[in-house]
Amino acid sequence: MAGTIEVLVPGGQATPGPPLGPELGPTPVDVQAVVQDINDQTAAFDGMEVPVTVEYDDDGSFSIEVGVPPTSALVKDEAGFETGSGEPHENFVADISVEQLKKIAQQKQSDLLSYDVKNAAKEVAGTCVTLGVTIEGEDARTFKERVDSGEYDDVLAEDAEEAAA
């Protein structure tokens, strides 16, 4: 490849303007084609900042690698709030269901250290703690113990078995 460009773009809303346009302008690629491809690949992250890497060749060909937004951005988007709590252990800003937590864990799993959704969910719960988000109406700090005790096996365990297979 002739070069690589790394940018953060709003999911599904990239434009030929900054930050992409100035970076891609001097390259041989079709800027509009790159923008369209990025928007197609990031549509699921509508409006969230998404890390994107564009690799291009001298002949104008390109490839795009889309990263996953930060866990905190996924939690904020799923729970529908803008800013985390200034006192996350005392003031809670939102509540999410285990199903919502599972969805975030599945989106983020490739970037996490976890080998299955059950453990990825525990990692996401850690982010919920720092943001001041409760899970099923309870403090996220107790989520790990509840998962380990089997309380959410019906929601999370089947994915753990699939990942291990």
Image (spheres, rainbow, N blue to C red):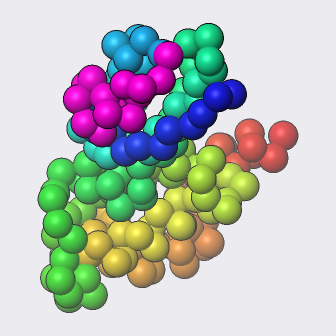
Q: Is residue 128 left or right of residue 156?
A: left
- Magenta region: which residues? 15-28
Q: Nearer the viewer, residue 116 or 39?
A: 39
Q: Is residue 155 left or right of residue 110?
A: left
* Residue drawn where x is 29% and y is 73% of the image: 131
Q: In the rendered structure, does residue 24 fall within the stretch colored magenta?
A: yes
Q: Nearer the viewer, residue 141 or 138?
A: 141
Chief secondary structure of the magenta portion: loop
Quick one: quadrant of the C terminus? top right
* Image x and y of residue 57, in percent: 63, 21
* Residue drawn where x is 62% and y is 72% of the image: 148
| Quadrant of residue 55 within the rendered picture | top right
Q: In the rendered structure, does residue 96 fall within the stretch colored magenta?
A: no
* Image x and y of residue 93, in percent: 16, 70
Query: Where is 50 relative to 111, above or below?
Result: above
Q: Is residue 116 left or right of residue 22?
A: right
| Quadrant of residue 84 within the rendered picture | bottom left
* Residue drawn where x is 54% and y is 27% of the image: 64
* Image x and y of residue 80, in percent: 18, 51
